[in-house]
Image (cartoon, helix red, strand yellow):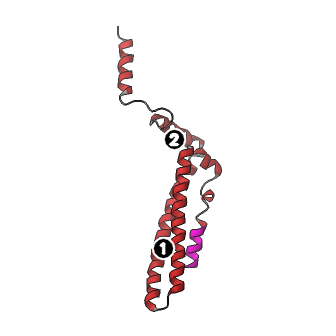
Amino acid sequence: MTHWTKAAARLGNLDDLASSAAWHSLERYMGMSIRRHLSTVVSQLAREGELLRGAFAAAVSPADLLKARRQLLNFRNRYSRVEMTLMFFADAINTRTNPKVSGYLKAYDILGGLEGEPAPLGWHRRESRRRHQDHAP
């Protein structure tokens, strides 16, 4: 049990997930949102670990120990899911430090209207018709 609760506590340092350059490569609002979400997830896991530690400390009967054991198994599963989530985000964030991939992602952001002012719906059709009319004989 101690192994799992200490491991959960170590997940709390989000700077271990990605370099500061990788975090800074994210748009500010997105980086803050991701950090806040991941911090919340890790904090919840740490609280569950403390509850688990308390359940083992308070166990006085075989039934109590069986219940605490089930809680430990649930905690291990939850830890694995949290760790997998953190690794997913670490990979996604660190990918932006590769200049080629970063360029592609920024281009997709622009094309998707995520950066700057998004184009109004139907804009490309109207623009295409206007260009066609300008070049008509």
Q: Which residue is drawn at 47% across and 38% down?
A: 114
User: Which residue is tagged 2?
Assistant: 105
- Disc ID at residue 75: 1
Which residue sits furthest bottom?
61
In the rendered view, would you say 110 is above or below 85? above
Q: Where is residue 31 in the image (x, y as percent from the top left)?
A: 56, 49
The amino acid sitting under disc 2 is Leu
Q: Residue at x 49, y 73 (%)?
A: 76
Q: Position of residue 71 (x, y in %)?
A: 46, 78
Q: Residues within 10 Å of mark 2 (few under 14, many from 20)?
A: some
Quarter of the rendering occupied by the N terminus: bottom right
Q: Within the image, what quadrant is residue 4 found in?
A: bottom right
- Distance (Cα) linking label 1 and label 2: 36 Å
Name the side, left or right, on which 135 lies relative to 78. left
**Magenta span has 4?**
yes
**Magenta span has 3?**
yes
Tell whether label 2 touches label 1 (CB within 8 Å): no
The amino acid sitting under disc 1 is Phe
Viewer-nearest residue: 68 or 93: 68
Q: Within the image, what quadrant is residue 66 found in?
A: bottom left
Say which element carries label 1.
helix
| Residues drawn in magenta | 1-9
